[in-house]
Amino acid sequence: MDCTLIKVVDQGLAKQLADLGFQYIKEGSAFAFIKSDELMSVLQKTYSNGAFICENKLRF
């Protein structure tokens, strides 16, 4: 099953992604972004150190 959400715990990274126009949903202490090709491209080019995880479920 393909993931639909990209989750970020780092608040600074989440703010940078939000400043780039990506919208998120707050999930506890994490920020859940809807996966898109554009978001994945930004993360892979800039944040390839594993600062995010890929999942299909929100957990409140």
Image (cartoon, rainbow, N blue to C red):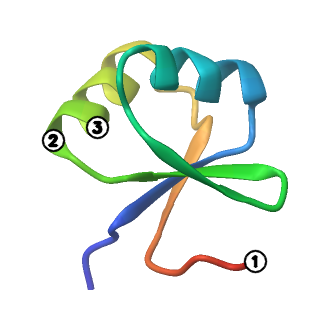
**Tag 1 residue:** 60
- x and y, in percent, of residue 49 in the image: 57, 27
- x and y, in percent, of residue 21 in the image: 35, 23
Residue occupying the far left of the picture: 37
- x and y, in percent, of residue 45 in the image: 32, 17
Evaluate if marks 3 and 2 touch, with contact meaning CB atoms under 8 Å apart. Answer: yes
Give how far apart the Cα atoms at labels 1 and 3 are: 24 Å
Q: Write the residue at 33% across / 68% down.
A: 4
Q: SS class of the residue under badge 3? A: helix
Residue kind at label 3, given as amino acid type: Met
Against 3, is 11 above or below? above
Residue kind at label 2, given as amino acid type: Asp
Evaluate if marks 1 and 3 touch, with contact meaning CB atoms under 8 Å apart. Answer: no
Describe residue 26's horizontal placement relative to residue 44 as left or right.
right
**Who comes first in sequence, dot 1 or dot 3?**
3
**Screen quadrant of the C terminus:** bottom right
Residue occupying the far bottom of the picture: 1
Against 43, is 20 above or below? above
Mark carried by residue 37: 2
The count of marks equals: 3
Describe residue 9's horizontal placement relative to residue 5 as left or right.
right
Q: SS class of the residue under badge 1? A: loop
Q: Write the residue at 59% across / 76% down.
A: 58
**Screen quadrant of the N terminus:** bottom left
Q: Write the residue at 51% across / 46% down.
A: 24
Check disc 3: other Cα within 10 Å, few if <14, some if 14-19, many if 20+: few
- x and y, in percent, of residue 34 in the image: 36, 55
**Tag 3 residue:** 40
- Discs 1/2, front: 1
